């Protein structure tokens, strides 16, 4: 669809310039958010899914989905919970049973950053997001443009001490939980099931880009001005337009201008859901609460855009200070994500038991039992108190420590040692969780060790593993590559050099693993090449043996019969 004018009376490109002209004479510089906006603008453009009207898939619920805006949403109605969990689940590529210590340490490093194990709370959040998207799009159309107030109208209403839109029912939900519990990662995993942007090719030949969801982080200082700028910049990146450039060069761009522009662009691209993370940062900026409240009212009443908030328990203070805002944050409920704890049936029960048992399956130590021992589960809970981020990092660093020491079983002593060494900065917070001291818990900002500190600890541990492995490789008692290959060829010869035999490949891997601690993949390739050569040699030899009698008979047939030869002598 071509860019049309809205009720403000200007196109998207003209909207900012018209407002800037009203501030003639002001010099140019950058807004406080320009640095972060520029960084975002330089990011690679995301994939935009192209659809035409023939691709629309309407659900049976015609009231909700009988329009193109919802016809491009995935249909989860026929998906079982098991299938949905499979879609959400994420983990690095599995490590081979015969992998050496270096390879296993690489897997652990990936596990810490990539693994996601769905829980019942994630399914609940997924259902809420799907419902908010469908209800938000219910009364919206591709061809309709909302009546959005201009920046001057917004400012005039503020001067008169009244909001520019009456508060009505809204669609909003909040996810609140201590830092490190996995709120942001879970939201991103769920949103990843949806296409973020869709380009509609309409029957009349026009097209436009629909943005299904938009996710931004509330700035650390709670600046609403920066928040609006981030919304505009994120939209510009998604649809590959230069919307944010209008605001990078003006010193005195006001909140009202930014707010009007953000609303206009969100309506233009039919944003289906706005996600605002780190909402607790707004506590720091009380002066802008009214601006934010009016922005939410306009999103709900004028644009019908649902909002999902995520933040720490500190955000609850923000809600309590203003009941009007609290209603806006919780029309679809406030979902308190508690840390994972065992239930009354045992230490390995409840969501805690489900999660830690799943995590245990991804351990790399060879002598660990199949099921997690109760004393290990107890030690992990005591040190992490069910905070997912702390648990993941503690488990990874503990397993890497055992690899360093050349041991193949995770011990309670190593878990406590690793916690004392690397998690000292959050020990007061863990103790507060043990005492269930709610007031103390709210005071702490981040209940996890810094990313840089964790990555540094992993890198040092991995280096020690590599150094230890290199010492073993230089041991004269270990077999050379040629010796390993010859021993493998002996096994292959007994199996007729049949590389299609899975049992043969398994025996070769075990034989290589027994004789070296280096990467066995390269040696296995060399072994297979030699096997192919030996098999070819054996086949050629067999063919040669079969052809020899045939060649001799041909040779004899060219000689004269004995009788003829005798006759020729006379």
Image (tube, grey):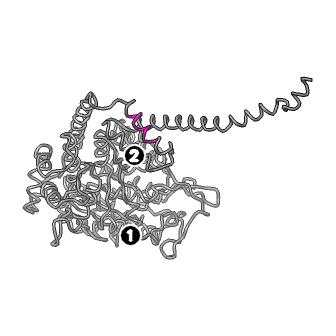
Q: Does residue 418 sit above or below 359 in this rendering?
A: above
Of residue 248 and residue 132, the one placed in the foreground of this image is 132
User: Any mark on residue 81, and which?
Assistant: 1
The reply to whether residue 281 is in sight is no
| Viewer-nearest of discs 2 and 1 | 2
Residue at the outermost right position: 570
Is 193 placed left or right of 119 in the picture? right
Q: From the image, which quarter does the N terminus lie in?
A: bottom right
Of residue 82 and residue 159, the one placed in the foreground of this image is 82
User: What residue sits 36% from the left and 47% below the top?
Assistant: 96
Q: Does residue 316 sit above or below 465 in this rendering?
A: below
Give yes or no for residue 330 being in the magenta stretch. Answer: no
User: Any mark on residue 487, and which?
Assistant: none
**What stretch of residues is rendered in magenta?**
484-492
Q: Which residue is mark 2?
A: 507
Give yes or no for residue 490 being in the magenta stretch. Answer: yes
Measure the alpha-carbon separation of dots 2 and 1. Answer: 40 Å
Helix or strand or loop: what does disc 2 sit on? helix
Is 239 placed left or right of 2 in the picture? left
Of residue 432 and residue 407, the one placed in the foreground of this image is 407
Query: Where is residue 83 drawn, in percent x and y?
Result: 41, 66
Q: From the image, which quarter does the C terminus lie in?
A: top right
Q: Is the stretch drawn in magenta largely helix, strand or loop? A: helix
Do the CB atoms of the residues marked 2 and 1 lie less than 8 Å apart? no
Dot 2 or dot 1, earlier in sequence: 1
């Amino acid at each position: 669809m071509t860019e049309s004018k809205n009720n403000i009376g200007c196109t998207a490109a003209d909207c900012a310039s018209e407002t800037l002209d009203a501030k003639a004479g002001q010099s140019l510089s950058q807004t406080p958010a320009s640095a972060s906006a520029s960084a975002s603008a330089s990011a690679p453009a995301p994939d935009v899914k192209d659809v035409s009207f023939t691709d629309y898939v309407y659900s049976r619920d015609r009231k909700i989905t009988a329009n193109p805006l919802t016809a491009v949403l995935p249909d989860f109605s026929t998906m079982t919970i098991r299938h949905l969990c499979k879609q959400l689940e994420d983990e690095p590529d599995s490590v081979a049973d015969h992998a050496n210590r270096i390879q296993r340490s690489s897997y652990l490093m990936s596990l810490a950053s990539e693994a996601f194990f769905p829980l019942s709370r994630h399914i609940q959040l997924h259902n809420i997001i799907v419902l908010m998207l469908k209800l938000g799009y219910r009364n919206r159309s591709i061809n309709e443009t909302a009546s959005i107030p201009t920046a001057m109208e917004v400012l005039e209403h503020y001067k008169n001490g009244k909001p520019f839109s009456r508060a009505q029912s809204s669609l909003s939900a909040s996810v609140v939980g201590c830092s490190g519990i996995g709120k942001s990662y879970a939201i991103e995993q769920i949103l990843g099931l949806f296409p973020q942007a869709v380009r509609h090719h309409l029957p009349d030949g026009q097209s436009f880009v629909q943005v299904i969801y938009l996710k931004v982080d509330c700035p650390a200082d709670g600046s609403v001005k920066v928040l609006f700028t981030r919304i505009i910049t994120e939209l510009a990146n998604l649809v590959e337009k230069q919307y944010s450039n209008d605001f990078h060069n003006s010193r005195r761009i006001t909140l009202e201008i930014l707010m009007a522009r953000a609303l206009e662009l969100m309506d233009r691209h039919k944003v289906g859901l706005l996600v605002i993370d780190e909402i607790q940062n707004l506590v720091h900026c009380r002066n802008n609460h009214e601006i934010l409240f009016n922005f939410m009212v306009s999103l709900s009443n004028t644009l019908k855009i649902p909002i999902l908030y995520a933040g720490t328990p500190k955000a609850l203070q923000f809600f309590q200070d203003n009941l009007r805002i609290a209603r806006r944050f919780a029309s679809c409920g406030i979902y308190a994500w508690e840390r994972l704890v065992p239930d009354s049936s045992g230490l390995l029960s409840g969501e805690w038991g489900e999660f830690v048992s799943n995590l245990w399956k991804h351990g790399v130590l060879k002598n660990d039992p199949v099921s997690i021992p109760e004393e290990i589960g107890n030690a992990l809970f005591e040190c992490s108190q069910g905070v997912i981020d702390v648990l993941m990092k503690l488990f990874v660093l503990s397993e890497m420590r055992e690899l360093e020491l050349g041991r193949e079983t995770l011990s309670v002593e190593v878990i406590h040692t690793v916690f004392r060494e690397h998690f000292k900065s959050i020990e007061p917070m863990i103790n507060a969780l043990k005492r269930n001291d709610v007031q103390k818990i709210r005071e702490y900002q981040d209940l996890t060790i810094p990313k840089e500190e964790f990555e540094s600890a992993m890198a040092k541990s991995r280096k020690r593993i590599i150094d230890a492995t290199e010492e073993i490789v230089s041991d004269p008692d270990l077999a050379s590559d040629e010796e390993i290959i010859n021993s493998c060829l002996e096994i292959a010869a007994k199996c007729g050099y049949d590389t299609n035999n899975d049992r043969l490949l398994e025996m070769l891997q075990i034989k290589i693993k027994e004789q070296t601690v280096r990467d066995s993949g390269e040696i296995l390739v060399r072994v297979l090449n030699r096997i192919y050569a030996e098999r070819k040699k054996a086949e050629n030899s067999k063919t040669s043996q079969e052809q020899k009698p045939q060649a001799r008979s041909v040779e004899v047939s060219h000689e004269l019969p004995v009788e003829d030869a005798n006759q020729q002598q006379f």
